[in-house]
Amino acid sequence: VAHVTEPDPRRRTPRTDVVLDDPRLEEAVDRLGRERVKESVAAVLARCRDGEIEPDQVVEHVVAALPGSASSLRRVVNATGVLVHTNLGRAPLSAAAVEAVTTAAGATDVELDLATGRRGARGCGALAALAAAVPDAGGVHVVNNGAAALALVACALAAGREVVVARGEMVEIGDGFRIPDLLESVGARLREVGTTNRVRLEDYERAICDDTAFVLKVHPSNFRVEGFTSAVPVGDLTQLPAPVVADIGSGLLAPHPRLPDEPDAATALRAGATLVTASGDKLLGGPQCGLLLGDAQLVGRLRRFPLARAVRVDKLTLAALEATLTGPPPPVVAALDLRRPELKARAERLADLIGHDLAVAVDSEAAVGGGGAPGVTLPSAAVALPHRLAEPLRLGELPVLGHVSDDRLLLDLMTVPPDQDVAIAAAVADAVRRSGG
Ligand SMILES: *Cc1c(COP(=O)(O)O)cnc(C)c1O
């Protein structure tokens, strides 16, 4: 009797197009595109040729290897206690903003007046909502981000001229980008006044000359200087014979009782600032964008300036911004209303769900983060877990990001939408399982 040998796996390996046409991959091809699925098929077939995978298991392996969506960006749970987390995309959008983005994603009337059938003012709904939210602004405009707003102002007003700015306000925004470099990159010259810790109105007065384009007041939004310090408020700067541009950074449109030291657009404009610039995805809680608010004629000029076209926002941003301004409070704003007792009660319930062998509810301190309210802590509550779970939780199907403090992993609930608590409990159970109990 002839000995039956295993046939050569290379000869038993199915062909790529045969696998791709398998009905079990049809949905994936629709969702991810044929090319993306083909890459996974090729990788699995290579393992099949090596004899690692049986030919009849190929499709199962391809399905398991395929990503959930065509983008590599994953949904994660921000349990860091940092409301505006730069590495996690800053402000999460409200459900209303997400809905608006989805609607605008197709063909949309962003630049068409449906009533007349003629060209309409681009993004007029979002701009009207912004104007209504900041009645002190004579004119409003929206660009790609806060840095673009500043670059546009500097380029339009100060190319080849001087911007007077306090030394203590020469801020690095993050990732190595610095506001002074940004201004110089569009041709403005900086005229620094004062010292690192102190500046007086006379310092500004002495610096102003015929070449002064504007005085820039920058909110040091990511650090705090304590001790022997002084700065000049916007209201005093407006006595100077030059326009004042206030970069408030975080995008608060009006004062917030919980963030008394955080500058806001309405207050800066009422104090006499000619123009205010801010980000849309920090404390405003909206999409990434840059707001320009202030003198109507100046804003009109900026809107028509050539660089404005290069920093123009897309329809998705306009849609999300309008919904953020007119809809229910976005997550960042809602989080600022949360108090420790309700968060602690939630943390107790979540600890019950996870199991008290692992989890305990504790007090914690949340923060605004991401360029806003430096040094402000917000009393919050968290679930404390063994810190060894930090990595498996980060690597799970639904990555959960907490922060390690005193050798424990804290999952802070101020930054977590309440409807995610059950998913967190499941993610913890999964992380425990994968890390060997
Ligand atoms: C965040 C910030 C910026 C930069 O805004 P982006 O939207 O990140 O471009 C500029 N100035 C200040 C004071 C900021 O806080």
Image (tube, helix red, strand yellow):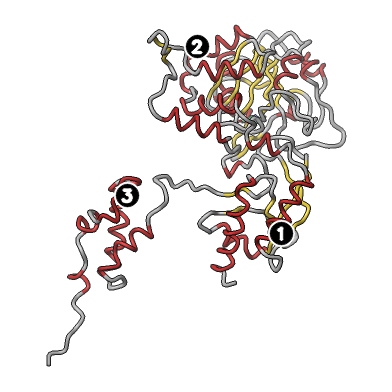
Q: Indicate left or right for 409 with 22 as reference.
A: right
x, y percent for residue 93: 57, 35
Q: Residue at x 28, y 73 (%)?
A: 51
431 vs 9, left or right, is right
Q: In this view of the protein, which residue sits in the foreground, 119 or 187?
A: 119
Residue marked by disc 3: 27
Residue type at the position of mark 2: Arg
Q: Position of residue 20 (x, y in %)?
A: 24, 54
| CA–CA distance in space, label 2 to label 3 | 47 Å
Report if the CB atoms under discs 3 and 1 are less than 8 Å apart: no
| Depth order, front residue of 97/157 | 97
| Numbered disc in front, either 1 or 2 | 1
Residue beneath disc 2:
304
Q: Closer to the N terminus: mark 2 or mark 3?
A: 3
| Vertical position of residue 332 compared to residue 46: above or below | above
Q: Nearer the viewer, residue 120 or 184?
A: 120
Q: CA distance from mark 1 to mark 2?
A: 53 Å
